[in-house]
């Protein structure tokens, strides 16, 4: 009779531990599914291999694992070991549930707590045709003048804030038709104070410069896409793609295309791909096409011990996108993500890396891309892109505006007579 009662008691304790373990698994799964579904967060699951992040993904399995281990121990005479493991399972269920619900609450609440400061910025709505004023420069008529910077990383002491301010002042002085910020504007996207620091400096130094920021992987961290949109894509704005993260901008002189590639191709779904091909196919064949993105394509780099993948010649972006660029005659692709300035060329498409807006430089490249033509490591700066009647002039500038390197890209219209569509190249 006592044995029967004891057996029932074990079954009840086992059931109770199982129910709590399943709750913990469900809470952990809900937290990860919510996080994974956020714009720009998927890359973290693929690239980040720190033990802390892996624990967040796998901790939901711990209570069930401990309970499974206790089952064979129930058969031995001494009941203490199985009882102890069931106890550990219950405690871990409680801790995993608490951690999962806490992180879920943080992801939802952190970006929504605190007020974003009112910024005095000249943000450009991608759905409105960009006006440009031609100017003479070195006897060349500049039909469109762009400035591009990336990876300013407001919010970390690792960034050289003086260099960042110098670069912004140089850009303000240059008065470009459009200034692209290619992402990683802040270090941790969920931090309202970091966005406020960025908005404060941008409002103070480049209030009049037409500005169009893209979202980088750091901007999207832990719910940061909410603040990115709030800061840089007001509700009144729209785009040809319907997305605030990728779009084309019409100008008289060039086709400008912004892509949503915060880490790699995690967000490059069928919808973005179809839209991109349509934009490139129907682009005016007489105008150059310039593509902007946060993550790079061809690039020199290194192996980061915290990351699961090589940080050079992008293993996702190259096969997924460069054949499209080559097919439709994209002239220049400008990206950040790498904290260098680099110029590369592959199959007649030119690539510029400009992730040097004050953020800590990446180490000297252990891998030099075969496509690399010029690189500046540990040098802060930005790029000016001036479009003339025949050339795209790319000027790599240091933080005080001195030209470090210049490239002239002759853009060759791929006209097919009688056709208003850009003819794909074989
Ligand atoms: Fe960065």
Image: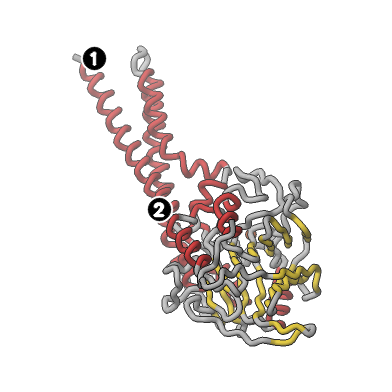
- Position of residue 31 relative to residue 375, above or below, is above
Q: Which residue is mark 1?
A: 3
- Residue 7 visible in rendering: yes
Closer to the camera in the image, 350 or 404: 350
Q: Which residue is mark 2?
A: 34
Q: Determine whether the beta carbon of the residue marked 2 sits less than 8 angstroms from the nearest atom of ligand 1.
A: no
Question: Mark 2: which secondary structure?
Answer: helix
| Outermost residue to the left | 1
Between discs 2 and 1, the one toward the N terminus = 1
Q: Is residue 81 left or right of residue 266?
A: left
Closer to the camera in the image, 73 or 346: 346
Q: Dot 1: few (<14), some (14–19), or many (≥20) neighbours within 10 Å?
A: few
Q: Position of residue 376 (x, y in %)?
A: 78, 61
Image point (72%, 69%), residue name: 409
- Residue 205 visible in rendering: no
Image point (63%, 55%), residue name: 297
Image point (36%, 46%), residue name: 27
């Amino acid at each position: 009779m006592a044995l029967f009662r004891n057996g029932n008691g074990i079954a009840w304790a086992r059931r109770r531990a199982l129910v709590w373990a399943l709750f913990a698994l469900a809470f952990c799964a809900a937290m990860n599914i919510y996080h994974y579904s956020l714009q720009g967060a998927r890359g973290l699951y693929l690239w980040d291999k720190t033990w802390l992040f892996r624990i967040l993904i796998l901790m939901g399995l711990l209570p069930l694992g401990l309970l499974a281990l206790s089952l064979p121990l129930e058969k031995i005479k001494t009941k203490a070991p199985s009882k102890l493991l069931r106890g550990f399972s219950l405690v871990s269920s409680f801790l995993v549930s608490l951690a999962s619900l806490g992180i879920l609450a943080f992801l939802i609440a952190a970006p929504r707590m605190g007020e974003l400061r009112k910024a005095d910025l000249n943000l450009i709505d991608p759905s409105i045709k960009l006006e440009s004023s031609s100017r003479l420069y070195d006897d060349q008529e500049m039909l469109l003048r762009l400035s591009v910077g990336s990876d300013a990383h407001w919010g970390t002491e690792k960034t050289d804030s003086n260099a960042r301010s110098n670069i912004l002042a140089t850009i303000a002085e240059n008065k470009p038709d459009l200034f692209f910020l290619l992402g990683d504007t802040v270090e941790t996207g969920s931090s309202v104070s970091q966005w406020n620091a960025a908005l404060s400096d941008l409002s103070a130094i480049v209030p009049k410069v037409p500005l169009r920021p893209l979202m980088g992987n750091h901007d999207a961290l832990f719910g940061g896409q909410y603040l990115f949109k709030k800061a840089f894509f007001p509700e009144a704005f729209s785009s040809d793609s319907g997305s605030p993260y990728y779009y084309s901008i019409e100008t008289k002189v060039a086709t400008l295309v912004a892509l949503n590639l915060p880490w790699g191709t995690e967000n490059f779904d069928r919808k973005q791909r179809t839209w991109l091909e349509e934009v490139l196919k129907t682009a005016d064949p007489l105008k150059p096409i310039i593509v902007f993105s946060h993550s790079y394509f061809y690039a020199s780099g290194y192996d980061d011990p915290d990351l699961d993948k090589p940080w050079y010649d992008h293993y996702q972006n190259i096969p997924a996108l460069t054949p499209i660029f080559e097919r439709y005659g994209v002239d220049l692709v400008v990206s950040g993500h790498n904290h260098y300035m680099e110029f590369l060329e592959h199959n007649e498409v030119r690539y510029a890396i400009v992730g040097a807006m004050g953020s800590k430089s990446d180490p000297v490249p252990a891998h030099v891309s075969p496509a690399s033509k010029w690189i500046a490591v540990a040098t802060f700066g930005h790029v000016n892109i001036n479009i003339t009647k025949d050339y795209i002039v790319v000027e790599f500038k240091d933080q005080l505006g001195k030209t470090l390197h210049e490239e002239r890209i002759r853009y060759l219209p791929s006209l097919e007579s009688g056709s208003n569509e850009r003819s794909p190249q074989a």
